[in-house]
Amino acid sequence: MADESLSSSVTTLGATVFFAPVQPEQLDRIHALEEASYPADEAATYEKLKFRIENASNVFLVALSAPEGAGEPQVVGFVCGTQTRAPKLTHESMSTHDADGSLLCIHSVVVDPALRRRGLATRMLRAYTPYVCATTPHLTGIRLLSKQDLVPLYEAAGFKVLGPSDVVHGADVWYECALELNGGGSGEGPEGQGEEQAADC
């Protein structure tokens, strides 16, 4: 169970959804959700998800649904990433994990198909920021790649669109989105943006 200071909850479809750190035994369910959410040429493999759980669990948050009455909570969504020392997203910076890196690269934002379009993704992203600030206080920024139709989702969660990305992943054009953080000491993000444009940690 997540520390109470890092969790929040919402009731949807007769169940309470709360956010918690990832657990190794959730890998199979996480992989199934990943495959249901991305085309085959974009979805992370089982091995990559396993690597992120084992090596970057500090930046891996799951949404759990607790049915009313009885039953074990089930993973219904997740956000995961890796860290880098690079100032922007590239194939290289997104393919490794450097625990000392101050830039967080989000790889997946996934919600169970049955719970989509109910605001859960936005709530999950808003819970994710304070979570990673608490687990990884030296972070100065978060980056992710978004397809054009999903840009409004990330803007609602506080991200700013930097423009089209040079990264090629699958068949579609991707846009790099950024959220600067006040944590990490100086208040200056990797792009040199000041505190007035940063999210509080």
Image (spheres, rainbow, N blue to C red):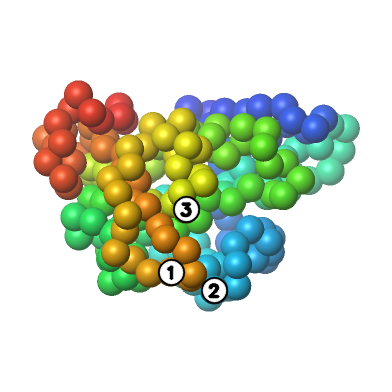
Query: Which residue position is annotated with label 1?
Result: 169
Give the amino acid at mark 3: Lys
Give the left or right position of residue 157, taking residue 76 as reference: left
| First-in-chain label (2 vs 3) | 2
Say which element carries label 3: loop
Residue at mark 2 to residue at mark 1: CA–CA distance: 8 Å
Residue 61 visible somewhere in the drawing: no
Q: Position of residue 108 (x, y in %)?
A: 50, 56
The vertical placement of 25 against 73, above or below, is below
Q: Amino acid at mark 2?
A: Asp
| Spatial separation of the CA atoms under disc 2 and disc 3 | 14 Å
Q: Which residue is mark 3?
A: 147
Q: Is residue 135 left or right of residue 63?
A: left
Q: Quadrant of the C terminus?
A: top left
Q: Quadrant of residue 8?
A: top right
User: Furthest residue to the top?
Assistant: 196
The amino acid at mark 1 is His
* Rendered residue at 63%/58% (across/down): 37
Taking the image as shown, residue 51 lies to the left or right of residue 161, namely: right
Q: Is residue 177 left or right of residue 84?
A: right
Return the disc, 2 or 1, that comes first in the chain's sequence. Answer: 2
